[in-house]
Image: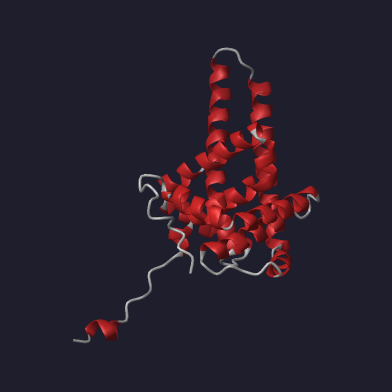
Amino acid sequence: MLDVTGPPQTPARIPRVLREGGWLAWTYLPTLIGLNVLWIAGALTIVLLGPMTVAAYGHLAALRDDTPPPWRSLGKRLRASLWPGTLWSVFVGVYAYVAWANVTFWPRVLGHEGAAQLGVDVVWLLWGYLTWVVTALQPYLLDALAARGLPFGRALRAAAVDVIRRPVAAHAFVLIPLALSVIGRSFRTPGLLVLVTLLLTLAAVHVRPVTVREPPVDESTEAAP
């Protein structure tokens, strides 16, 4: 089994997500590159953007759980992800449209004179924070859809509960996609080769404490002398 905790010389002060996720990504780098190319091909169709994202996440979550799947399983995983992946992309798309509509509509209505500017600032602050929360929700939502196989409604509720239980870690994770987006804008080649699947790998490692549960204690064994 693969030890995804990283090599012994890895500094412990490095955040767990970067330490374990970086080691996992390096170990399976060819897989990440291949998945990234397939993801881009699916994203270009628009229709397969969501299903391919969910399928790729499921493939990477299996690597995280030390059960490397064969490549041929990706087609089956993609077919299973068609409906939940489509719902996921609709959810993200609708939210993005509503957020964009609000941050462009209200400034035109309220204007920027005097107290009206305060209202515009509140709108921007509100939707900025909501976008941060929705972004923080995504790793848990993808894991619930791809790794746990929950229907979209239950997956969304489970993801929301997980974010509420781990608010600091969930909010802090958003810094990673922000950093990767800056890298992607600066260096186009890494973006084409690995950035999407690297982000999904880090997301899978990020939610690992939620997905891994301690085995139940056997009371009969515990009571034995």
Residue, far top: 114
Residue 178: x, y in percent?
Answer: 56, 37
Q: Is residue 140 visible?
A: no
Tag count in the figure? 0
Residue, far right: 45
Residue 86: x, y in percent?
Answer: 72, 57
Query: Residue at image x 46%, y 54%?
Result: 20
Q: Quick one: 153 or 46, which is closer to the camera?
A: 46
Query: Residue at image x 62%, y 63%?
Result: 59
Q: Is residue 154 above or below residue 171?
A: below
* Position of residue 34 in the picture relative to residue 17 (left or right): right
Residue, far left: 225
Q: Quick one: 137 or 58, which is closer to the camera?
A: 58
Q: Is residue 5 visible?
A: yes
Residue 4: x, y in percent?
Answer: 46, 59
Quadrant in which the C terminus appears: bottom left
Query: Residue at image x 49%, y 53%?
Result: 23
Residue 97: x, y in percent?
Answer: 70, 39
Query: Residue at image x 60%, y 12%?
Result: 113
Q: Is residue 93 above or below residue 218?
A: above
* Position of residue 80 in the picture relative to residue 130 (left or right): right
